[in-house]
Image: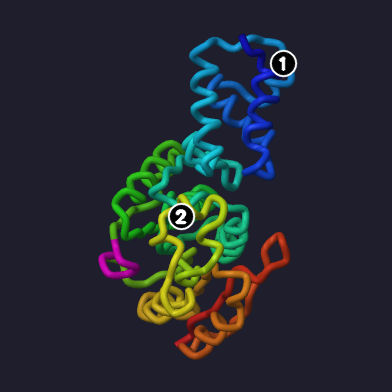
């Protein structure tokens, strides 16, 4: 029989070669098996595991050892202090994207009507978070993937969000509404053949949500171009992009006639989100 402590020691040894956070990974996976918080592991290190618990734990450790992201193994990831269901059909929420939400909230009044669209919503983290924080806003979440939309709808239901509507759409193609105060998106922006696509969690994430043509800029250009027909006067455009794409994205925005173009840095100090205002 293995105790919690001995199981974690063995798991950390098994994961050390493939993970920089082997102990955290092991603890999260064991908590998932036990339906407990991490504090429980520290409070009861000598508690013996049942054989089926140990078997389930080691099955998860083996999949993690093969590289499968922890978020996919347990089916969830926290974002903006909320728990979101995730699967290999959607990107894993990342802290970088909290900047996009933070900036979006600055433009949405807390007590007045406001209409916005989240393009390429994936698991729905952006649309649902904005809708939860600004209940007077009318939010549309669009994604080309039916599987991603099902996950986003599930996440809206689990957080009791009622001011989001979901549409399967290739960007704006099948969205009935035409005029928005804000267009916001975390689109694919990694260049085809980028070496990062063969590293870490990205290997298991949907490539269609990661990779774009024209050195990763094609979808950003499409969104910025077409948003001009869907933004109200003085409407706002916010797009997340790669850390090394600041100048190209600003050039795209300015070339399409956006005003007040500027780029914001994420928590790591990397250029991550570019803004433009449509005044035509």
Query: What residue is drawn where x is 59% and y is 12%?
Result: 49
Q: Which residues are magenta?
A: 169-175
Quarter where residue 228 is shown: bottom left
In-image side of 271 versus 119 (left or right): right
Q: Give the crowd class for mark 1: few <14, some 14-19, many >=20 residues within 10 Å.
A: some
Q: What numbered label is drawn on residue 127? A: 2
In the rendered structure, does residue 97 fall within the stretch colored magenta?
Answer: no
Q: Quadrant of residue 262?
A: bottom right
Camera-near label (1 vs 2) is 1
Question: Which element type, helix, strand or loop, lies under badge 2?
Answer: helix
Q: Quadrant of residue 247?
A: bottom right
Residue placed most toward the observer, 279 or 219: 219
Mark 1 falls on what kind of element?
Answer: loop
Q: Is residue 95 above or below residue 158?
A: below
Q: Is residue 71 above or below residue 163?
A: above
Q: Is residue 150 visible?
A: yes
Is residue 232 something that shows in the picture?
no
Residue with the mark numbered 1: 45
Bin the neighbour count of mark 2 within 10 Å (Cα to Cα): few under 14, some 14-19, many 20 and up: many
Image point (69%, 33%), residue name = 23
User: Nearer the N terminus, badge 1 or badge 2?
Assistant: 1
Q: Position of residue 239 (x, y in %)?
A: 52, 70
Which one is nearer the viewer's eye here, 13 or 268? 13
Looking at this view, is 87 or 273 the one in front?
87
Query: Where, quadrant-wise, is the C terminus in this rendering?
Result: bottom left
Q: Position of residue 134 (x, y in %)?
A: 52, 53
Q: Looking at the picture, does residue 226 appear above or below residue 172?
A: below
Location of residue 66 with respect to 62 vertically, above or below:
below
Task: Indicate the position of residue 22 as horizontal and vertical percent values.
Answer: 67, 37
* Main SS of residues in magenta: loop
């Amino acid at each position: 029989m293995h105790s919690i402590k001995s199981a974690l020691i063995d798991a950390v040894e098994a994961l050390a070669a493939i993970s920089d956070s082997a102990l955290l990974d092991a603890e999260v996976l064991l908590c998932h098996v036990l339906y407990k918080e991490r504090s429980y592991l520290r409070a009861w290190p000598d508690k013996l595991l049942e054989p089926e618990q140990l078997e389930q734990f080691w099955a998860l450790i083996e999949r993690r050892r093969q590289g499968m992201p922890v978020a996919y193994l347990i089916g969830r990831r926290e974002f903006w202090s909320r728990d979101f269901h995730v699967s290999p059909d959607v990107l894993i929420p990342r802290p970088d994207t909290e900047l996009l939400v933070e900036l979006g909230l600055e433009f949405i009044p807390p007590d007045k009507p406001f209409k916005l669209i989240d393009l390429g919503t994936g698991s729905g983290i952006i649309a649902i978070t904005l809708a939860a924080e600004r209940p007077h806003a009318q939010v549309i979440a669009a994604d080309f993937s039916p599987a991603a939309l099902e996950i986003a709808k599930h996440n809206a239901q689990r957080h009791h969000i009622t001011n989001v509507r979901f549409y399967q759409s290739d960007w704006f193609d099948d969205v009935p509404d035409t005029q928005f105060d804000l267009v916001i998106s975390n689109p694919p922006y990694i260049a085809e053949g980028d070496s990062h696509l063969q590293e870490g969690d990205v290997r298991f994430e949907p490539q269609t949500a990661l990779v774009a043509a024209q050195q990763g800029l094609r979808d950003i250009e499409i969104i910025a171009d077409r948003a001009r027909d869907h933004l109200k006067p003085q409407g706002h455009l916010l797009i997340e992009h790669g850390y090394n794409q600041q100048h190209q994205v600003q050039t795209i925005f300015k070339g399409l006639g956006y005003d007040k173009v500027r780029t914001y840095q994420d928590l790591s100090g990397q250029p991550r989100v570019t803004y433009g205002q449509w005044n035509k």
